[in-house]
Image (spheres, grey):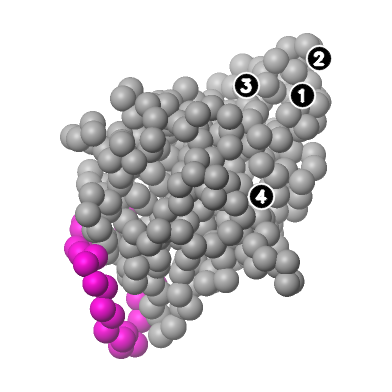
Amino acid sequence: MSHHYSGPDFSFPQGDARLDFTDLYAFPKPGDAGKSILIMNVHPSASENPPGHTTSEPFAPEALYELKIDTDGDTVPEIAYRVRFSAFERGAQTAILYRVDGPQAADTADGGRVIVEGAPVSVGREATVTEAGDIRFFAGWRSDPFFCDVEGAKKNFQFTSNDFFADKDVCSIVLEVPNSALGAREVRLWARTLTLGDGSGWVQVERGARPAQSVVLVEERDAYLGGEPKDDGRFLAGFAHALEHTGGYTPAEAKRVAGTLLPDVMPYDPTRPASFPDNGRTLTDDAFDWFMRVLTNERVTGDSVGPHGDLLREFPYVGPPHRSRTTNAPTKPNDFGDNKHERSE
């Protein structure tokens, strides 16, 4: 599967589905090559261990959701977008989006320059979009765009063409930004979630960019999920060992291939078409098939499962959720200042 269920034994980090990072996407805006779309998905709607539905609360108010951007190739971020959420009350939640530039972007901290404040989180099928200048922002429940035959993968790659995620939902954070906001022609991206520790400030509990490898190849799970891409060289031997075992690689070839998977960042040049794994990732890229080819040394080439048909042609691009989580409870009016709100679908 993708980055879903990256806790121990296919559970969630700290047992909290809201903290589970699932996928990262980056691609030029369709019809406007001067802008980019960045999507960070979290919180799967279904649990594997134990099986069942997860909470209807979209995002954790005690958590920090962050997108890191390295602009100079040193695997240290120079730009960060941070999102915090209000408490989920009477079926409603709001978001605040910050941007941080310079050395502070690498900090494990809250705050920054406010870009969007009081943005409503979508809990129904209709997408509520917030605009602030040349930035567009969305947060809320969406149809999970990831596609993969999970059960077939578990059964030694005996695929049945059954897409486990076809009827599943996820919580999306979607940004539309001018390419100039990314700071360079080619950048490296990754996402992470953090929560407040016991008096110790923010603690990173999840991170990643490339799908599947943190679930399948990692031996030191807590160290990996709590680590930084700049230090990923320490996991090279573990990745290589897993590739030798699963793909039958020679030790030298396994080490070479492991080196293409680390550091765990996504390269993205907005001036070129997006295509995983070389440049960003679109919502229709078959990342699981690519990973299966790497994992098995080309012995398994695909699971016969394709992209979902519910994707939107406009922002936020991710399809409507399969299940609405709206309630009839009244919500309090908000003063959103200069932020503009619109609805799509």
Q: Select label 4 or label 3 by which is in front.
A: 3
Where residue 333 appears, x then y in whole percent? Answer: 27, 84
Secondary structure beneath disc 3?
helix
Q: Are marks 2 and 4 in contact (CB under 8 Å)?
A: no
Q: Is residue 165 visible?
A: no
Sequence-earlier tag: 2 or 1: 1
Type of amino acid at the residue the image marks with label 4: Ser
Q: Is residue 28 above or below residue 110?
A: above
Secondary structure beneath disc 2?
helix
Q: Is residue 237 visible?
A: yes
| Structural crowding at the residue carrying mark 1, measured as other residues with C-alpha within 10 Å and reported as few (<14), some (14–19) or many (≥20) | many
Separation of residues labelled 2 and 3 (CA atoms) = 15 Å
Sequence-earlier tag: 4 or 3: 4
Separation of residues labelled 1 and 4 (CA atoms) = 19 Å
Where residue 197 appears, x then y in whole percent? Answer: 70, 67
Give the image quarter of residue 295: top right
What residue is rendered at 38% in x and 78% in y?
A: 92
Separation of residues labelled 2 and 4 (CA atoms) = 26 Å
User: Residue 334 colored magenta?
Assistant: yes
Q: Are marks 2 and 1 in contact (CB under 8 Å)?
A: yes
Residue bearing mark 3: 260
The label on residue 251 is 2
The label on residue 6 is 4
Toward the viewer: 294 or 323? 294
Give the image quarter of residue 133: bottom left
| Structural crowding at the residue carrying mark 3, measured as other residues with C-alpha within 10 Å and reported as few (<14), some (14–19) or many (≥20) | few
Sequence-earlier tag: 1 or 4: 4
Separation of residues labelled 4 and 3 (CA atoms) = 21 Å
Segment colored magenta: 319-345
Residue bearing mark 1: 240
